[in-house]
């Protein structure tokens, strides 16, 4: 803990020189401002969401619709915080239809899920290298039939995902209460890079069992 501008602050636990837009599995925790219980109550080991909790839930599941490289895993909302696992897979490519539809392909395939690969947190010179975007149209074997183009989208990372979740959910809660600009979340959040399958399983179980502990 250090003193900054006459205020004590907790040092960041984030890994220095790590690119948080890199492929990997990330465990995040976000708390409400002042740790206020605003998302519901726990009854008999089950979290009962109120209208604010349902807003946060909807905003969480909507995130992949805005970020092509984001996959969601285990997730739970508690009265004053949420836990979740965010997966970044920059091999995924957005596919934009001329009809206005948006989907995701992985290495040109459909419905292929990414597997957990061990994450090395050794800082490498090429760690910030971003995947190349393919902006060329896909081959169209059926002209005039829902032609699809890959969009050239720069990959975002954990900080952007959390920012969006906070912004979208706060805006909707404030619209509900007619309290424009009210802060609902703590400025900071906790993150942890998941390094192997054993750790992933342990964190998933922690999230699933959180309301009953």
Image: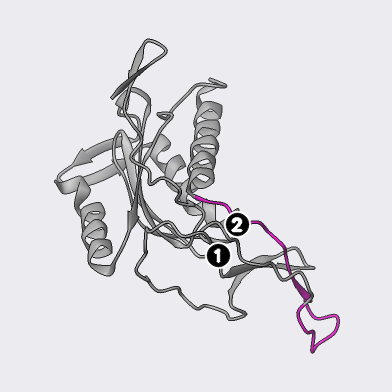
Spot occupied by residue 164 in the image (x, y as percentages of width and height): 54, 42
Residue that mark 2 sits on = 155
Find the distance from the CA under tag 1 to the CA under tag 2: 7 Å
**Residue receiving disc 1:** 90
Residue 36 seen in the current view: no
Quadrant (top left, top right, bottom left, bottom right) of the N terminus: top left
- The residue under the point 26% across, 44% down is 47
110 is higher (above) or lower (below) than 201: below
User: Measured from the top left, where is residue 105 in percent x and y?
Assistant: 60, 74
Magenta-drawn stretch contains 101: no
The majority secondary structure of the magenta stretch comes to loop
Q: Are marks 1 and 2 in contact (CB under 8 Å)?
A: yes
Please report the residue visible at 52 percent of the width from the left and 39 percent of the height from the top.
163
Which of these two is toward me, 22 or 25?
Answer: 22
Q: Which residues are magenta?
A: 138-157
Q: Which mark is residue 156?
A: none
């Amino acid at each position: 803990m250090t003193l900054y501008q006459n205020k004590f602050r907790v040092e960041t636990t984030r890994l220095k020189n790590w690119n948080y837009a890199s492929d990997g599995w990330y465990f995040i925790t976000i708390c409400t401002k002042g740790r206020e219980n605003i998302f519901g109550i726990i009854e008999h080991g089950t979290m009962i969401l109120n209208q604010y909790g349902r807003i946060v839930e909807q905003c969480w599941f909507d995130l992949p619709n805005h970020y092509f490289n984001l996959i969601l895993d285990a997730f739970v909302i508690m009265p004053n915080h949420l836990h979740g696992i965010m997966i970044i897979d920059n091999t995924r490519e957005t596919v934009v239809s001329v009809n206005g539809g948006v989907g995701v392909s992985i290495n040109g395939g459909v419905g292929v899920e990414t597997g957990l690969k061990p994450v090395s947190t050794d800082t490498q010179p090429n760690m910030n290298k971003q995947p190349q975007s393919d902006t060329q149209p896909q081959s169209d074997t059926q002209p005039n039939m829902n032609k699809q183009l890959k969009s050239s989208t720069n990959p975002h990372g954990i900080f952007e995902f959390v920012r969006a979740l906070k912004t979208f959910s706060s805006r909707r809660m404030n619209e509900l209460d007619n309290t424009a600009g009210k802060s609902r979340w703590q400025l900071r959040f906790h993150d942890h890079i998941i390094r192997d399958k054993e750790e992933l399983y342990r964190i998933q179980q922690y999230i699933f069992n959180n309301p009953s502990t």
